[in-house]
Amino acid sequence: MTYRVYDYDRVDKNGKKRELHFDKAVQVMNMKVAQDVNQKPRMVKYYSGCSRELLCRCKYFETERIQVTKGFAFSVMDTSFQVLMCLSGYGEVQTMDAEQKPMRLSKGETMFLPAGLGRCLIVGDAELLKIRC
């Protein structure tokens, strides 16, 4: 069963906020913390215009936190799509395709970049999560 603990202030067809199930959700939560929750220190790499921190990597995906202060270039290869999530600030994603207009991204927004998009440039001042699958 799924319990609703937060609903982004959405309303039903009658204009009333939907019911939350906070008490029921707390009753079924497993709040025990595993003994081995320690993480190894992560390395932040600094470049001209951005910094990059690898948060997680496995055979299925990779997640990086990127702090863009001026610009950040990367490629979206034919083998995989990528997702950008803007945690703070704003930026603009530009591609090498002259017909493709720059795509804006700001705090709280997520952008799907299809496989094969090629070379991209993010310009702006933003903190991003970049997920490569």
Image (cartoon, grey):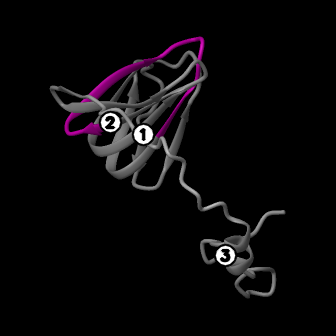
Residue type, mark 2 in image? Ile
User: Circle 3 is placed at which residue position?
Assistant: 10
Q: Residue at x 46, y 55 (%)?
A: 108
Question: Which residue sits furthest left?
Answer: 48
Question: Which residue sits furthest top?
Answer: 78
Alpha carbons under labels 1 and 2: distance apart: 6 Å
**x, y percent for residue 31:** 60, 62
Q: Which quadrant of the figure contains the C terminus? A: top right
The boundaries of the magenta stretch are 67-84
* Callout 3 crowding tier (Cα within 10 Å): few <14, some 14–19, many ≥20: few
Q: Is residue 127 left or right of residue 10?
A: left
* Callout 1 crowding tier (Cα within 10 Å): few <14, some 14–19, many ≥20: many
The circle on residue 129 is: 1
Query: Decide: marks 1, 2 in contact (CB < 8 A)?
Result: yes
**x, y percent for residue 46:** 18, 28
Disc number lying in front (3 or 1): 1
**x, y percent for residue 40:** 35, 32
Q: Nearer the viewer, residue 74 or 40?
A: 40
Mark closer to the chain start, 1 or 2: 2
Mark closer to the chain start, 2 or 3: 3
Residue 6: quadrant of the picture = bottom right
Mark closer to the chain start, 3 or 1: 3
**x, y percent for residue 58:** 54, 22
**In this view, 13 is above or below 114:** below
Residue type, mark 3 in image? Arg
Q: Is residue 77 magenta?
A: yes
Q: Residue at x 40, y 18 (%)?
A: 96
Q: Is residue 61 magenta?
A: no
The circle on residue 66 is: 2
* Callout 2 crowding tier (Cα within 10 Å): few <14, some 14–19, many ≥20: many
